[in-house]
Amino acid sequence: MDSDRVPVRPDQRHRPTPRSGGDHAFSRISWVFPSFPNAFSNTLTIRCGGDPMAKKARRIALIGAVVATLGAGFASAAPAHADDAHYYILIGGTCDGKASVYRPEWLRGGIARVVDYPAGAAGAPNCDQTPMDRSVAIGHDRGRQVVQDAYRENPDAEFTVVGYSQGAIVANMVLNDIADGQLGVDKAKFSAKLFADPMQPPGPAGTGISATLPPGTGLPSPFGGYVSFGAGRPDFAGVRSIRYCIQTDGICDFDPIQAAGGYFAQHWCYQWPRPTDQRSIMQDTIADGVYTNTSVRLGKQDCWGGPVHP
């Protein structure tokens, strides 16, 4: 599939544009207390005066309203057990171990579960200094655990593993485990969205930088840990998936001539919004339900600069 446009289901074409702005960290307070302002504006309009029993009744009503508000907030943040619940296992790229690249509204009501790992890059400024091979190994272990915990929490839900850049390497390994039946979960419940995958196997959408070298080639720990992890699977044996790669992004579309320039020009355009509509590739695709079990080549992007998560 060779297209400049991201596959979009017909029922997704006219969805309201989510609010933009702010940083990419998840705001738990906004999830837990979404109705606090309304509760207080309603209850605090009760005026003082009248008989003591009336005052007592008003105080009880105020307390009840606050408790109800807290209950509603926690209920919205609590694990969902409905059949239509959808969990997103989020794995950030290099220097983004908290997966802050993914904005909560992009999940369209889904439940976020973050794989918290070093996302290290030895020698990179403002980044965890864990060698990359060790960082990926830690992410793999933690990713397995997050998948199992989420599945035990609600085995009737749907689950999507989302990985970007180094996080896509971790996602490949976790998805291999799911596909091979090693995690004790129903793989039919799982899907995957991979962005700028270094392990992208050779094909029309490009070849990932890791897939161009034999596994283990490079500088293993303690010398940076920058090694090849080989090529990923073309598909994950029953786990629905899709890879997205922007043309000339040297991470997933490695070409010796264009790789470096393409990396700096394109690698962040999965997360950054386009000037034309203030939307991003991740925003449009993470929760769109589209899976091709292939790699999708996206045309060169024009995107607005923002926080960098390599």
Image (cartoon, rainbow, N blue to C red):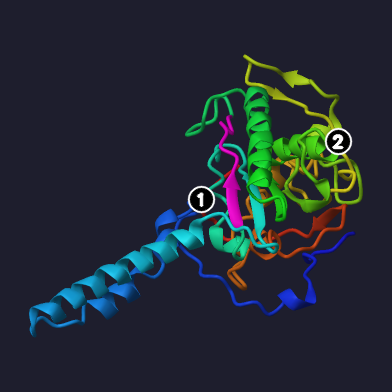
The image quadrant where one finds the C terminus is top right
Question: Which residue occupies 55% across, 40% down?
Answer: 96
Q: Secondary structure at mark 2?
A: loop
Magenta includes 116? yes
Disc 1, SS? loop
Residue type at mark 1: give it: Pro
Asked if 29 appears above or below 288 in the picture, the reply is above
Residue 252 position in % (x across, y down): 77, 43
Determine contact: label 1, label 2, CB under 8 Å.
no
Q: To which residue does mark 2 refer?
A: 180
Q: Is residue 196 above or below residue 169?
A: below
- In depth, the one of 69 and 292 nearer the eye is 69
> Disc 1 versus disc 2: distance between alpha carbons?
36 Å
| Residue 30 in view, yes or no | no
- Judge whether residue 265 can be spotted in this image: yes
How many residues crowd around disc 2 within 10 Å: few (fewer than 14), some, or many (20 or more)? some
Residue at x-position 63% and y-position 41%: 149
Q: Position of residue 130 (x, y in %)?
A: 56, 24
Q: Compare marks 1 and 2 and give the one earlier in the sequence.
A: 2
The residue under the point 61% across, 23% down is: 131
Q: Magenta part of the protein: which range?
A: 111-120
Residue on which disc 1 sits: 307
